[in-house]
Amino acid sequence: MIRPVIFATEKGNRYLYSPSRNQFSLTHPLVNHFYSLEQDAAGIRALLKEARKRGMYTLEGIGTFSYGELLTRYRKYSFLKKQGFFKPRKRLNLEGGISPADIEDNIGRIKQLIFEVTEDCNLSCAYCTYSKYYVNKARASREPNLEEIRKTITWFLERRKLADSRLTISFYGGEPLKNMKLISEVVSALESLPGNRTRFKFTMTSNGVYLKKYIAYLVEHDFEVGISLDGDSEGNTYRLLKNNRPSYPIVIRNLDYVQEHYPEFFEKNINFMSVMHNRNNYGTVEQFFREKYNKVPLMSDINTVGISDEYKSEFYKTFIEHKKDDRYERTPMEQLMLKHPGVKEVAAMFEVYSGMVFKNHYYMLQPRQNTRFRKKYIPTATCTPFSMRAFMTTEGKILPCEHIGREFEIGWADKENVHVDNREITGMFNRYYKKIKTFCDKCYFADNCKECMFNTGIENERPSCDFFMSQRKFGEYLSRHFSTIENDYPFFLNIAKHAFRKEGS
């Protein structure tokens, strides 16, 4: 059962979160005290009788109250209890799963195909997920076969149910621009497909070292390019060339060249991604990109999933120790708005737990808490296979996405065919759902989970989750975000304006 959570903000205000009503209530300390006493099976009536004799009641650490106020607060507690505010809520039904038909439908509606065109890279970034710090197989200099890629794309197009829609084709590495020959061959093959009605959008993630060399081609074919850059020169000192010299000067020269010679392309098609570590922070990175390129980057904290036990201590000492924690500093939150993780967390908390955000008028008449527990949910936030994308490695393995281990393949491609067994994939995912469910059943965050089960050690006998929420941790989570709201209510209203605007506006 999910029990009510009482929490206090930085300003000392106390709130009750009622899971059965999916609603918050500002409450007096005495109301919360009555609930705590009842939870401990203490005699509330005996307490009232004793307070009546003395004419007062002292709540340690809070203050002394008259009997009249104590009685008033008890009546408020009784009212809230009668209205179900203190009623536990049963947990979500996490018995959901997928079927072969679901996978077939996903294949027909897939939005993105990602191809690893090389394992080789011209950088040697200290925090790379293929560095010594992470549990990963060694990278080689393998390159995929053009015919395997062509066969894979054709296989998905033949099963496509959205013939007139756009399909994103993305190139991944290593550094994808190290194999521009293969990329150009794939693009040419797709642009010459006879009778094709699918519109292709080409994208890639690059470190920018070869950007100037191939920019004319990228502009000609309207590529969307995400450049990995961690802010200013200090922020990029972990991003080194193979000879351990800094990559930053080269990348900046290339970016400046593109901005000068292809300004429209730079404005529309160049985006940035930054990793947060102990040599940068949200404030400095936001300021750098806004002043230098009038852009807002996508920022994410350094990956702490899959770190080798052997190097865990060294990893935290190298990249995390002395890291400035400005995750909840107001200036970068206001500047970045919904691109800032702290702002997204506040918006998500209010959307899921306030009971005040409705998708449409129907939801206002039929609140979701009346129906949500009849549904069967799939544990975690893991994408179902092919629902968003598929990733093909240089070896021809097909994975659900580019962020998970190669041991979780769901198919493979060769020069002859694409091999995908929907029943086998269904069995694999449903097995994993069943395994992680026992863990998720105890989590207060199960209905707002953002974690992928492939980051939990799901292949092991006992998975674990860094984002697991006990009742205590959930209270701390609510306290942190309510404190943000209380400390600057106009700022919260601005978050609400951006996060909950009407569809189409």
Image (tube, grey):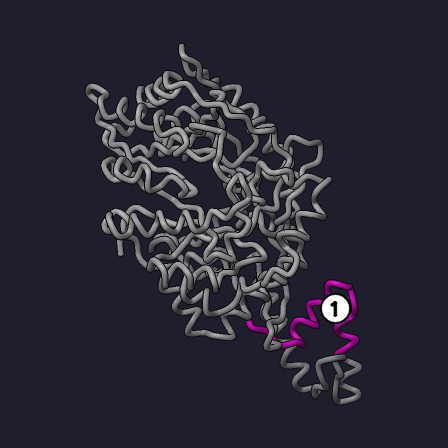
Total labels: the figure holds 1
The x, y position of residue 31, in whole percent, is 65, 73
Q: Quadrant of residue 47?
A: bottom right
- Main SS of the magenta segment? helix
499 lies above or below 28: above
- Seen in the image, is 131 located left or right of residue 295? right
Q: Residue 215: tell me if it is visible.
A: yes
The x, y position of residue 40, in whole percent, is 77, 64
In the image, farthest residue toward the top: 416
Residue drawn at x 37%, y 37% is: 204
Residue drawn at x 60%, y 29% is: 138
Q: Which residue is under mark 1?
A: 37
Q: Residue 437: tell me if it is visible.
A: no
94 lies above or below 151: below
Residue drawn at x 74%, y 68% is: 37
502 and 405: which one is in front? 405
| Residue range of the region highlighted in magenta in the rendering | 24-48
Residue type indicated by callout 1: Leu
Q: Quadrant of residue 453?
A: top right
- Seen in the image, is 264 located left or right of residue 173? left
Does the magenta-highlighted stretch encompass residue 373?
no
Does the magenta-highlighted stretch encompass residue 36?
yes
